[in-house]
Amino acid sequence: MKRKASLYVILILSLSPFFGAVALAQVQVRVRVMEASNVGSGFDSSLRDLHDQLGSLFSFSSYRLLKDENVSLSSNQPVSLSIPPERSLELTLINQHRVTAEIRVRITRQGRELLTTLVRLAPGRSVSIGGPKRGEGTIITALSRPQ
Amino acid sequence: MDVNEAQLISRCQLGDQEAFKEIFNQYHQKLYRIAYGVVRHREEALDIVQEVFIKLFRSIHQFKGKSRFYTYLYRMTMNTAIDHTRKMKKVPPLSMDEEEGFQLSDDADKRPDRILDHKELEARVKWAMDQLSPDQKAALIFREVQGLSYQEIAEATGCSIGTVMSRLHYGRKKVQELLKDYVEGGK
Amino acid sequence: MKRECSSISRLLEKYFDQEVTPEERSLVEGHLPDCSACRMALDTMQNLRILIKNPVEEAVEKETFPWVWEKIEKGIQQKERPVFWNFLKSWLDVTPLLKRKLLIPAVAAVVILILITAPLLYNKMSSYPGPSVVEYVESETYNVMVYELETPQVTVIWLFEDPEEESSTS
C-alpha cells in the first residue's frame, strides 16, 4: 500500500509543471486613460489596439494617452490608482474561470462611489469606461488584458 | 455559550464544514452589522465578512473558550474592518481638505434629490466616525450599532469597563461636536 | 441645584446606556423633570445613536448576502492546499522502493496521465472569450449606458454626468 502511495506521489509530482502553468496566478491588467476630443487630430500609438473598437463607436478626432499602467491583481486584494479627472479606480480580482478573470471595478470621487461594475475579461479583451468631461475632452479609461 | 454552540465549535475545530456553515448562518448578519458600521459601504462590508469567516476557519482551533464565542467573533470582525479602513486610507485622498473638515459640494443644497441628501449625510457620519481613534470607534459601534453592554464591549476589546466608558464618553463627545448641526437636542 | 446637575450629568451616559444601578436610575429620573440641560443632553445622545445606527439597520435589512457563503467556501478550500501538499511530502521518504521493478509501470502511468490531462489543460489555456463582458453595473450617481458588440469586440460603459458635475470638474 505504501509503495502504491509513493508511486502516486511520483506521478503527481511529475505532472506538477503542467498544473503550475494553470494555477491561479496573478492577473495582469493594463489600465490606459485617454482624453478623447474633437480638438486636433491624432491617435496615440499606445492606443492602436483600441482603434477599431473606439472608432466604430465614437467620432472623436483625437485620442491622447494620459496614463498607461500595468497592475497585477491577486484574488480579493484591491488595487487602487488615481485617474483623471480627480477620481480613484479600484480593481479587485473576484474570480477566475479558466482564463477569464472576473474583476470588480469601482470608481470613486472624494470618497463617493460613482460606479461599480463586475466585468469578465479574457486575455485580449478590453472594456472601456467613459463619460467624465475634462475641458474640451472626454476621459475614457480602457482596461485590457494582454494576450 | 450554550451546549449547541459549544458542540458546533468542537465540530468546526475538527474541520466539519457543515458545522461551520451553521455558524455562518447564525452570525453573518451580526458581523455584517459591525463591518457596515465601520466602513459604511456594502461591498467592503461583504468583503470583510467573507475575510472574517475564512480567518475564523483557520483559527477556530485556537479558541479555548476563555471568552464568549460571539465576543471573540466580534473582536475579529472589528479588527479586520479597522485594518481594511487603514488599507483603503493608503489611496491618496482626492482634494478633500481635512483641516477644514468635510466639504459638501457647493450646490448640494440646490439638489432636489432626497436620496442624494441622505447619502451625503451618511458620508458625513462616516467621515465623523473616521476622525475617532480605532478604540473609540470600536466602542461606539459595539454600543450604538450592536447594542453590546459595557461588559461585553470590554470583553470584545480586551479592556476594563472603566476604559470602555471613557472611550464611549470621548468618542461621543467628538462625534457630537463634528455633527452638532444634526444631533443637538431638540432637532 | 448646580451641584446636583454636575453629579447627575456624570451618570447620564450610563443611564442612556441602561447601565445604571436602581439607585442611580432613581437619582437621574428624579432630576430630569427639573433640568432641561440634562434632558437636552439625552436627546443629543439619542439623535447621535439614530444617525449612527439607522443606516446600518437599513443596510442589514435589505442585504441578501449573494454568493457570500460560496466565496467563503472557495477561500477555505484554497487555504487547505498547503495541508494536502504536506501530506504528499510525507510519502517521499519511500522513494527507494521505486528502484525495484517499478520504473516501467511508473513511466507507463505517467505517459497515460499526460495523454489524458493534456487535452484538458489545452482547453484551459484556449483564449476563447465568454459571450459578454459586463456582469453588472451599479451607479447611484449617474445614468449609465452599457454597449456591447461581438464584431468588432467592443465593450463600453458610458457615464452620463449631471451638467453641474461637469462644470465642477472642467
Image (cartoon, rainbow, N blue to C red):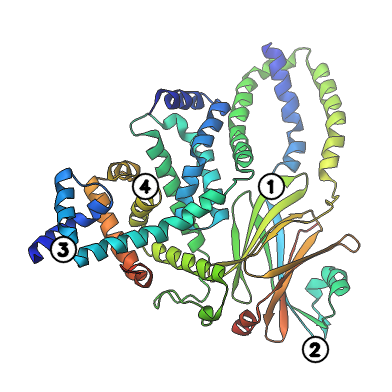
Q: Is label 1 on the same chain as label 3?
A: no
What is the CA distance from the residue labelled 4 to the residue labelled 1?
Answer: 36 Å
Local packing at callout 4 (Cα closer than 10 Å; few below 14, some 14-19, many 20+) is: some
What is the CA distance from the residue labelled 2 to the residue labelled 1?
Answer: 41 Å
C95 displayed left or right of B174: right
Local packing at callout 1 (Cα closer than 10 Å; few below 14, some 14-19, many 20+) is: some
- Identify whether B177 is placed above or below A95: below
Q: Name the residue at the right extreme.
A: C151
Instruction: From the top left corner, tell me how far across and down residue A89 is, in percent.
Output: 62, 65
* Residue pointed to by mark 1: A95
* Residue pointed to by mark 3: C34
Instruction: From the top left corner, tell me how far across and down residue B59 is, in percent.
Output: 47, 34
Residue B83 visible (yes or no):
no
* Residue pointed to by mark 4: B147
Local packing at callout 2 (Cα closer than 10 Å; few below 14, some 14-19, many 20+) is: few
Q: Is label 4 on the same chain as label 3?
A: no
Q: What is the chain identity of the residue bearing mark 4?
A: B
The quarter of the picture where residue C147 lies is bottom right
What is the CA distance from the residue labelled 1 to the residue labelled 3?
Answer: 62 Å
Q: Nearer the viewer, mark 3 or mark 2?
A: 3
Q: Which amino acid type corresponds to the residue marked 3 in the rendered image?
A: Asp
- Identify whether A144 is placed above or below C107: below
- Identify whether B42 is placed above or below A17: below
Q: Which amino acid type corresponds to the residue marked 1 in the rendered image?
A: Asn
Residue A79 visible (yes or no):
yes
Q: Nearer the viewer, residue C103 or A103?
A: A103
- Contact? badges 2 and 4 (CB < 8 Å): no
